[in-house]
Image: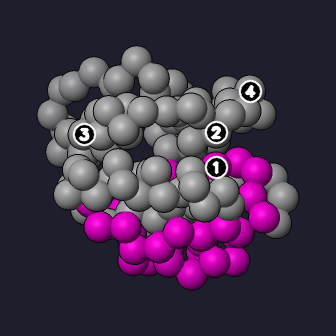
Amino acid sequence: MCRRALIVEDEILVALDIESALEAQGIEVVAIAADSRTAMRYADRVDLALVDINLRDGQTGPAIGRALAKDHGVSVVFVTANPALLGEGVEGVAGVMTKPFSERCIGATVDYLTRRGTGAATEPPSELRLFG
């Protein structure tokens, strides 16, 4: 079950919107990270991450998402205004939501990831494009 989250976003107002939406779902936000070094510092403390592509240290979001998912077992969703930069997706990452997003969309995405993790059949929200 997704209960602790990492937000990887360099625009603080966007990060705070995501934080508010997650907290409304009962999710504890462990940290907000604006770059890869900071994000990876929290990798072992979270089970969910919402990751932008373009961060303070460049276009490092895809590498962060891959590492969080594959090396640390974190459920990862990209949140970006540029989903085309991800092509067909990133190995291990669940999918991508396009900015702008709504609080409802984040809630539905977290609910989907939580149910998927338990094996319960559920449909993803229409705003979430799944990979693979």
Crowding around mark 3 (Cα neighbors within 10 Å: few <14, some 14 to 19, many 20+) is some
Q: Is residue 113 left or right of residue 17?
A: left
Mark sitting earlier along the chain (3/2): 2
Residue type pointed to by label 2: Thr
Is residue 50 visible in the rendered image? The answer is: yes
Q: Between 28 and 43, which is closer to the camera in this rendering?
A: 28
Cα distance, mark 1 to mark 3? 20 Å
Circles 4 and 2: CB atoms closer than 8 Å:
no
Mark 2 touching mark 1, by CB under 8 A? yes
Residue picked out by circle 1: 52
Dot 2 corresponds to which residue? 80
Along the polypeptide, which appears first: circle 2 or circle 1? 1
Label at residue 74: none
The residue segment tinted magenta is 27-56
The mark closer to the camera, 4 or 2, is 2
Q: Residue at x 78, y 64 (%)?
A: 56
Q: Is residue 92 above or below residue 89?
A: below
Q: What separation in Å lies between label 1 and label 4 (alpha carbons)?
A: 13 Å
